[in-house]
Image (cartoon, rainbow, N blue to C red):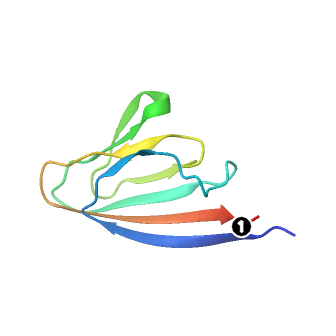
Amino acid sequence: WPSIFSGLEIIANHVTFSHRDAGGSPSLFDLLVSLGRNHHATLALADLHAELDYSPGAMVYIAGRVLEYSVGPWLNGEQVVIVHFMKDAA
C-alpha cells in the first residue's frame, strides 16, 4: 500500500542554497508560503532559468524533487517561510 506522509517546516531568516529535495517524490508538490515583513526575497528556479518574486504573501507549489531551487539573501526585514511537503516513505 502507499506509504505517503506529510510534514510541515517553519524556516526563519534562512538563505537556502540551490538544491533538489532528495527525499521528495517526483509526483508530489511542496507548498512554500513566504511570510514576514519588509523583505524582498526571490525564489530562483535554476532549471527554468527563472527568478520569482518571493515577497510576503507569496505562495508557490513546486516539485522540489524535480526542480532545483534556492532562496538568496534579501535586502531587509524578517523572512519566515512555512513549507508543507509530502514524502513517499517507500
The x, y position of residue 28, in whole percent, is 66, 54
The x, y position of residue 88, in whole percent, is 71, 63
Residue 41 vertical placement versus 23 (above, below): above
6 sits to left or right of 17: right
Residue at 67% in and 71% down:
5
3 sits to left or right of 10: right
The x, y position of residue 23, in whole percent, is 61, 58
Taking the view exactly as shown, the residue that stands out farthest to the right is 1
Give amino acid for label 1: Ala
Local secondary structure at mark 1:
loop
> Where, by quadrant of the figure, is residue 37 drawn?
bottom left
Residue at 87% in and 70% down:
1
Residue 78 vertical placement versus 47 (above, below): below
Mark 1 Cα within 10 Å, few/some/many (few <14, many 20+)?
A: few
Taking the view exactly as shown, the residue that stands out farthest to the left is 76
Taking the view exactly as shown, the residue that stands out farthest to the top is 49
The x, y position of residue 12, in whole percent, is 28, 67
Q: Quadrant of the C terminus?
A: bottom right
Residue at 13% in and 48% down:
75
> Where, by quadrant of the figure, is residue 42 drawn?
top left
Residue pointed to by mark 1: 89
Residue at 54% in and 49% down:
64
How many discs appear? 1
